[in-house]
Amino acid sequence: MAGFGIGSEIASVAATATVPITAPPETPKLPPREWVKANLFSSPFNSVLTVVSTAILLTLSWNLLKFIFNPIRQWNASATNLRLLMTRAYPEEQYLRIWVCVAIILTLAGSSMAVWRTGSAMPVTGLGRKLLATGALLVLLALLAPFSAGATVQWLLAALVVAAVGEALRRTGGRGETERTVSTLTLQVVALAGLVASLWVIPFGHHSYIPKRIPQVMHEPGTVALSTKLPWTIMLVVVVAAYFGGVLLRDRLAENALRVTLVVLWLLAPPVLVYLILRDPDFDMGHVIGTDIPIFLAYAVLGSTLLLWLTRPSTGEIGRIVAALVLLAGFATFLSPMRMVLRLDLLLLATFALAAPTFAGGLRARKRYTGAWLVLLGVMSWLITSINTASTVRVPGGFFIGGLAITLMVAIFTIVLSVPLGIALALARTSSMPIFRLLATWFIEFVRGVPLITILIFFSIMLPLFLPRGMHLGEVAAVIIGFVLFSAAYMAENIRGGLQSVTRGQHEAAEAVGMTTAQKTVFIVLPQALRVAIPPLVGHCIGVFKETSLLAIIGVFDLLYMARYVVPGQTEFMGSARESILFVIPIYWIVCSRMSKASQRIEQRTGLGER
Amino acid sequence: MSDATATEPTGGHTKDLSRARDMILCEDVSKWYGDFQALDKVSATIKEQEVVVVLGPSGGGKSTWIRCINRLEIHQEGRIIVDDVELTNDLRNIEQVRSEVGMVFQQFNLFPHLKVIDNVSLAPIWVRKKPRAEAEEQAMALLERVGIPEQAHKYPGQLSGGQQQRVAIARALAMEPKIMLFDEVTSALDPEMVKEVLDIMKALALSGMTMMVVTHEMGFAKEVADRIMFMEEGQIVEVGTPTHFFENPTEDRTKLFLSQIL
Ligand SMILES: Nc1ncnc2c1ncn2[C@@H]1O[C@H](COP(=O)(O)OP(=O)(O)OP(=O)(O)O)[C@@H](O)[C@H]1O
Ligand SMILES: [Mg+2]
């Protein structure tokens, strides 16, 4: 019986895969000249527009190139201060930590790409066409740019080679029965390998800034320093190895479990990287053994007992009351002075207690649920301890890291933390409980009525005054909290839009099969709402990333601040602000455009099979 | 006059239900939308294994009534008792009743973001707390029963209307309900797909499921119903076996309705 079922299933899948529905009629491709005629010169007005805009574009690019290649430009300001722009004054002898972080992120990225099967096949003809276009663009730039005659010839040659390869691919790719394709992943690896190889071959020059008592700038001809090219080569190996590791795991383990594990690792990565690896806390073992571990153990024992009891299907209504009481107790702890760990642990327990009925079931399910709580409790205790421990990495002034690193760090923390908070706010605002609705509405409307700058200043200057005695929050942490609250209020509104788009029929269908409100929300409503909310949410994330530049105003040394004030402030590079700014623009742009690409991909993926 | 139990089923094709226990009991159920009274003292008893078809003109309150039975709508007066559990504001009662009453909707209402098999197995896993493997096995068996095992790994949006409605039936059956409610489940289907859904409902009726069916398919009503209830303006106007109902209805309003549709 089962065999029959599976067999017929395979047969039907194969049938849908191999029997093509009659191919759509091919739209006839116009030869280039006719395409130009049809699209650019179809009417006199159109022709004028085409000519005028081409002229404008050419002038603009010519001026830009003239600016870039002007000999008085101090481009080595950015090259020399690359380390400053990336991480500010992170000590050179500790730089291994940075590379470890990058390697961890790349490992996660590589294996995620394998497990989520990203990357698609690109027709060889398409690739050829792209290369051809790139070659053409390079030719144009080489002709426009004020190079020396020799350099122009070199660039022209390179451009022609690119274009020729493109044309060859375009011609050969279309031949034969089926269209040949190449995987976009392969292309990416080839491109990256090319870049890394160029570090070893092409004499970019060795620039570095030595901040001794008298700052010294070093320029050496030749390829970049070994401390740059070696780590990047290792990183390339790491990401490729991680990808193949992911493929191996994917084919051996259950895919869903693997995905969940990866998501958890991704969520754990930011705090672990920042607070454990980069910051390197100097643990005080006496305190850890005397206080932190006993607190953890006490919570572990009490909490496990409570959760094991709460997840029994027979516990019933009393369980919900007990869970609510735990939550109340968690809030009540804020009224009296005590360690922050105690409060946070209690709030975590309350969250799990409230969700317990949803996960009630057999002994195995109950043990798994309690186990998940124990792991989370452990991670949280570890993090709280390390945040409260002094760092061994000593850096003059301010936070221990800066530049692009802090821009990314603030953005990632803000995004990761404000998504759940935004969801909670949106659910509260649409809930049937008036008190939740009221609080959420007030909060959202208040935050949206205040400029972000005000909130940031408030949190960096004022928040420390409001904290209970003995509690110390680093400035960056305070700013992130402000940022998270601000961003969550906006996200909540986007998510609320998504929630409203879930039809009443969906709610009723979920209710009709007996789901509780929590189950309905988690399994039916939120997935659909978030899918609708992805475009505005990603738009908002891009906004958050760019708004981190406001951090400069309250004295955080973010990427833009480094480029605008620190680098141009060095005696050697006095007045190189324009170059530095022009240098960071592509960095911002690359990150933002990646995010919007990712959003499009998620949309396509989750839209699979929907009407 | 609207007491449904007064008329004993007499049709030749009916089962002997005289000793069956009451599955659904409605006593003077009334419901208002604002000032508008949608249900007016509806009383009826539906026995275990009985198939009741509810007929009536549009706006007569059929959907409202059937949705009160699993508390998608809240009645304001009267009592509804489903399998000895009374529907009140008590959440536990509502959850218990809902997990015992399956419902199929006119608009299918499948979960579009889940594959067919997950649509069917989700509730057994989370509400009935079944192990996933067992729930999926059961889901496959149900999909086979409704004739579409090969669609298990597609998304609802990739299926035809008739197939979607069959998945919806499988989803409801996966909770192993004691009662199934059908609210005009063939009305949104193209004519050629109506039969495939009706056939499944017939098979279900034969298997002894207690069913309450709102429909405009007179053929189905004649063939499958143990009793037919006719609703108009929020009241049950007439109750009887199909033979009684279609051949010699007593009420004028029933006659008028039948003359319009037949
Ligand atoms: N949410 C609502 N708010 C106000 N009035 C409603 C609501 N739902 C239904 N009604 C009204 O209650 C009456 C009964 O509606 P119901 O949907 O039960 O009719 P029906 O018999 O199922 O009709 P149909 O055959 O068209 O489905 C109608 O007059 C309708 O306008
Ligand atoms: Mg209706």
Image (cartoon, coloured by chain):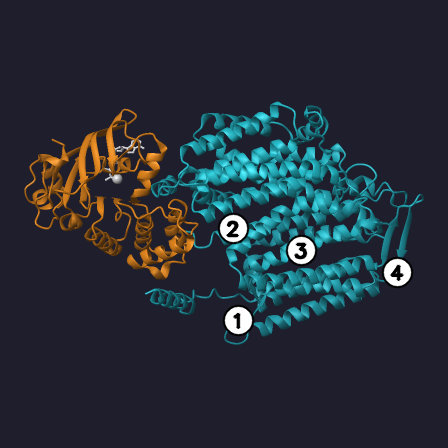
Q: Earlier in the sequence, mark 4 or mark 2?
A: 4
The answer as to whether the residues below labels 4 and 3 share one chain is yes
Q: Earlier in the sequence, mark 1 or mark 3?
A: 3
- How far is disc 2 from disc 3 in space, using C-alphas? 24 Å
* Residue A479 % position (x, y): 69, 34
Labelled disc at residue A603: 2
Look at the numbered discs 1 and 3 and tell me whether their residues touch, using CB distance below 8 Å: no
Q: Chain of mark 4?
A: A
Out of B13 and A606, give the one closest to the viewer.
B13
Q: Which chain is drawn using orange?
A: B
Within 8 Å of ligand 1, the CB of disc 4? Answer: no
Between the residue at mark 4 and the residue at mark 2, the CA separation in whole angstroms equals 47 Å
Tell me the crowding category of disc 4: few under 14, some 14 to 19, or many 20 or more residues within 10 angstroms, Cα based. Answer: few
Whether tag 4 and tag 1 are in contact, CB under 8 A, the answer is no
**Quarter the N terminus of chain A occupies:** bottom left
Disc number at residue A221? 4
Question: At label 2, which amino acid type do we have?
Answer: Glu
Q: CA distance from mark 4 to mark 3?
A: 31 Å
